[in-house]
Amino acid sequence: MEKEKVDCGFCGGKTELKFETLELLDGKVILKQQPYYKCKKCRKEFVSSEQMRETEKEINSFNVLRPIISTGRSLAITVPADLAKFYNLKKGENVRLIPESRHLLKVKIS
């Protein structure tokens, strides 16, 4: 639960809790009603560490679980249409697979 008012960490003034929609990646990811504080005295805006953790959780929850399928003698992972559109992927383009560890494989779009 957010505190309605906290003291400003910059000037000690009183703040008010506000909400704003954040657009990330040129508007491709939208986080609605993200809380922040605005000081009534110095007009600075800031977030608490708790607010930042919650926003980070929302950003990191953007993931998709896909099955590994067989195609010919190879294994494949399909990309959902909405992610293909998000990353502007086209049939025939190459991506780079980068092994980071036994449990982490990064995909880099060329």
Image (spheres, rainbow, N blue to C red):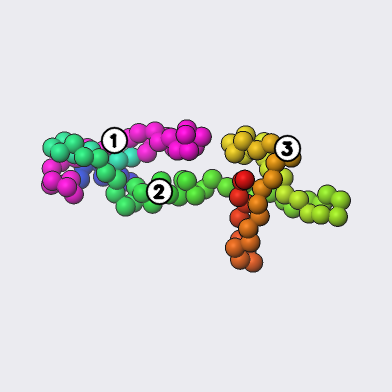
Residue at the (18%, 36%) spot, across then down: 43
Tag on residue 54? Answer: 2
Q: Of helix, strand and loop, which one carries label 2? A: helix
Q: Nearer the viewer, mark 3 or mark 1?
A: 3
Return the residue nearer the eye: 87 or 62. Answer: 87
Q: Of helix, strand and loop, which one carries label 1? A: strand
Extreme residue toward the bottom, this view: 102
Residue on which disc 3 sits: 91
Name the spot of residue 94 as percent of width and height, x first: 69, 45
Mark toward the start of the polypeptide (2 vs 3):
2
Residue 86 in the image: above or below residue 108: above
Residue at the (64%, 66%) spot, across then down: 102
Mark toward the start of the polypeptide (3 vs 1):
1
Residue at the (39%, 33%) spot, across then down: 21
Residue on which disc 1 sits: 18
Name the spot of residue 10 as percent of width and height, x first: 17, 47
- Please identify the quadrant where the C terminus is shown: top right
Kind of residue indicated by mark 1: Lys
Residue at the (15%, 38%) spot, across then down: 42
Kind of residue indicated by mark 3: Lys
Q: The magenta stretch spans which residues?
A: 7-34
Q: CA distance from mark 3 to mark 1?
A: 44 Å
